[in-house]
Structures are given as structure tokens and as C-alpha cells.
Amino acid sequence: MLRFIQILSYGFLNGALYGLVALGLSLVFGVMNYLMIAHGGLIMMAAYATFWAFFYTRIDPFLFILVVTPLFFIIGWILFKVLFQSLMKFPEGEKIKNSLLISFGLLLIFSNLAILFWTADERAVTTVYSGKVLDVFGVRLPYIGLGGVAIAIIVIIALHLFLTRTYFGKAIRAVSLDHEAATLMGINVNKVCLVAFSIGFALAGIPGVITSLHAFNPAISFELTNKALIVLILAGVGSIKGVLIGGFFLGAIEAAGVYLVGTPYREVFGLILFVLILMFRPQGFAGKKA
Amino acid sequence: MLKVHQVDVHYGDIQALWNVSFRVENGEIVSLIGSNGSGKTTVLKTISGVLSLTKGSVTIDGVRSDTIKAYQIVEQGVSLVPEGRRLFRDMTVLENLELGGYIGRVRPQKDENLKWIFKMFPVLAERVQQLAGTLSGGEQQMLAIARGLMSEPKLLLVDELSLGLAPLIVKHIYMTLREINRSKKMTILIVEQNVRLALEISDRGYIIENGRITGEGKGSELLKSDKVKSAYLAMG
């Protein structure tokens, strides 16, 4: 029993990271119907950025969130202008297809660049508190994982407040519901999309920092994109609040799978879940019927 | 106030408006009447900048508006209440109204404007926290108009507000518009299939057929004209 609780709580801690991983993807897809599958690649790049920054400065990696997030915001801004702005005028279906193609290309470029520069070796940022655990009635909770949960909750609450309490946040939601009606309110839809897209990139920086504290390598970009898509489907498209719950759920399912069948099959359970959700509840848990 | 001058509009290769010219003076209610597919909605979408014209010009208070972006036209004082209402259904009534008052110029007056709007449409005051999509049809139309008013427009464009609503509610909403026109001196351009109702509350009207303006006159005169009687009112 203790072993089950132990595995489940690992799943829970992982789940917070999955939620963070999916957050940017969900925002971008909800607002402009761009399926940014390069998202996992961005997170991987952010993990390398944190790794090297830590290697040279030895400053606590969690603090790099304050640097990596704005840096990725700017990268998102530039990439939107260069690659994604021209898709704005396409009809919805075309937007998904074209953004899928472009971002798949980006994903390949990112992971191959990472292999080229930093080899395919597994790396991890090792801090003084790496491997240290908090013991709760015999259940061991790593500090890094707990830090990840805290950050995930803070980030999601902050994003939620931004989207519901500020004029610009409300404009983002209005654009996600109806581009033309938003224009009639005097909202500059192009600018809103540019900013939302850049926020999506910035939101890749945060899980990137947390990923750097676990073991990672260039191939992780595909794995993370995979997780993000599963959480996106679980949460329901465009649901920010559902993302964290979806992440926890995926983490728990994976943990249960590991407990019952064994570690090699961890990925399988997420994918089975993905197919089941698409078959029986395609609108996701939090999403409404289309 | 509003001057539409020899405007052509195309949807791809298909021409929808042909040399359309008309004007709306300060403080007037003017209606644009015509049957399905005659180009009424196209005219409103062109004025609000959602569609771009291929020939001619649109000026508001002497300033060209067809050369600027659609979202900037709201700043110029034009607000469109679109056909089918186009509310943000998953957002609350209050959020819809706040988005109506999104442009920077009107944000400081938000509370004042809300107070005024709740006086005009008391039913909305009771529903502020409700999702827009859960309102009844009539309430949704009121919200759409209220949202359009939040940007303090000089010119309000109202597209087909009677669509799918009970006649009594439609009448009530039109009376409210009349009141707003009188008390706020707001200029209103109405597009409507319900010709009798539209002409009754309008100072003047234009008839549009197959994308061309084919007649104009005072509201009361048009109501009595043989052309309108036979074509739109099923009389004579």
C-alpha cells in the first residue's frame, strides 16, 4: 500500500509538470487555432538554456524562470512575425493544418540543433537539494517535485487572473471566441494574437526550467509535446483551468500503470487514455459539448 | 455625419454593392430596407470596416473611414450591433459589456455607462454574472445593443435586430432605441426586414435592391408609397 501511495504521489508531482507543459499549447490553440506542436522543443531548449546558465553561474535554477520566461516571450514575438502571422487570414481548418506543418518543422529543427550542439547525452542540473526528499509518514516527496507543483499552481492562478481580471486578458478570451465580434469591439485582433502567442512561448520557459532539474535529452521534445497533447485533450480545448487537473490526472494514470505493469509501459497508458478520451468524451472533461 | 459615396463591394469575383450612395445626418434615425440578399448587411459591414470596398468612399464627420483598420473605426465613434448578435457566449453579461467599452477613450466612464445601460435595459442588471449564452433571445439582443453602446458611439449601426424574436420584444427594443436617439442625440442607422416597424420609427429610409439604392424618402412617406406597399407590406 505504501508503495502504491509513493508511486501515486510521484505521479501527482509529475502531473503538475505535465499541466505546465500543456498550458502554453492550450492557450495558443484556444486563441488562434494554431497547433504549436513545437512546444515540447521549446521546453527542451529552455531546459538546455537553464542547464548552461547554471553550469556557468551556479545560481539557483528556479531563479532562471525570471530570465527564461521573458527571453522566450521575445523569441515567440519574433517567430510569430516571421512564420505565423501570415496564417492569420486562413480559415480555421487551414490554420490548424499549416501551423501543424510549420511547427513540426520547428520541432525537428530544435531537436536536431540540440543534438548537434550538445550531443544526445542525458543531462540534469544538479543542485544541493537534488535528490533530497520530504518524508511524510514514510512517503518520500522530492523537493524539486514539490517546487514544481508550487510553481504550476502559481502560474495557472496568475494566468487565470490575467485572463479574467484585465482588459487585455478579456480581449484574449474574446478573440478566442469570435475574431470578427472582437474586431467590432475595437480590439486589434492581430496584436492580441501576437501577444497570446508570445505568452504561449513564455509559458514554455517555465516547465523548461523544471525539466532541467530532472534528467533530459534532445529527444524529450517529442515526449513533452506528446504529453501536452494528451493533457490538452483531457482538459478540453481552450480550458485553462482544466489543464492543471488534466496534468494531475495524466500523472496519476501513468503512476497507476507503472505500479500495475511496470516502468517500461509508462508512455503507453497516456496514449491509451488519449484514444479513450477521443472516443468517448472528445470535448474533454472541462470542455462543453461543441 | 455619415456619407457613403458611390461604393462598390465585391465578395471575391461577385459584386455585392453597385454605386451605393446615401447619407445620415446628425441625430437622425435612418433605415435601410430591402429583402433577403439585397446587400443591407454588406453595407453595414462595409461602414464598420469588416468588409473593404473596391470603389468609392465612406466618411464619418468628414473623415475618411474606409482607409483605416476595422478596429480603429470603433475609435472614430462607430459601433455595429451585428446580425445574429455575435455575443461572447462563454463570458458573463458584465464581461460582454466591458469588452464593448474596450477602447481606451471610454474606459474611465465605465461605471457611468453601465449605470445608464442598466437604466435603459433593467433586465441586464439582474443578469450581470450570468453567461451571455444562457440569456433568452430578447435579452441577448438587448445585451448586443448595450455592448454596442458601451463604446459611446456617435453612430450606432443596428443589423436585423428583429431576427428570431417575438414582435412585442422587437417593438420594445425599437422604442428603447428611439429613446436613446432622443435623449443622447445618437445617430442610428437601422437595417431591417420588418419594413413597417423600421419605417415607423425612422426619420428617413432608403430602399436597397440587388445591391443598388433604388429609393429614398421620409419614413412616413415611404410607408405610404405604392412601391413599398406592394413590394414589402403585401398591400395593394
Image (spheres, coloured by chain):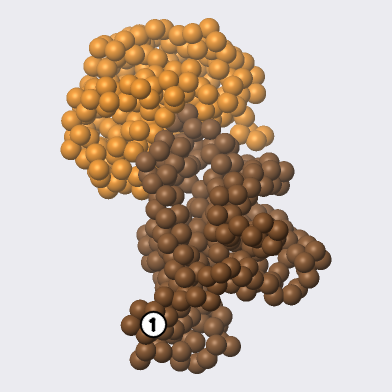
Q: What is the letter of the brown chain? A: A
**Residue at 50% of width from left, 25% of height from top?**
B48
In the image, residue B203 above or below residue A211: above
Q: Is residue B70 visible?
A: yes
In the image, residue A46 above or below residue A248: above
**Residue at 56% of width from left, 69% of height from top?**
A128
Which residue in the structure is indicated by mark 1?
A139
Rendered shade, chain B? orange
The image position of residue B20, as x and y in percent, is: 55, 17
Q: Chain of mark 1?
A: A
Please indicate whether residue A106 sits to the left or right of residue B40 in the image.
right
> Foreground: A43 or A49?
A49
**Residue at 55% of width from left, 72% of height from top?**
A130
The image position of residue B77, as x and y in percent, is: 44, 18
> Foreground: A33 or B32?
A33
Image quarter where the N terminus of chain A lies is bottom left
Callout 1 amino acid = Val
**Residue at 67% of width from left, 47% of height from top?**
A75
The image position of residue A183, as x and y in percent, is: 49, 33
- Mark 1 secondary-structure assignment: strand
Q: Residues within 10 Å of mark 1 (few under 14, many from 20)?
A: some
Please indicate whether residue A229 sits to the left or right of residue A256 in the image.
right
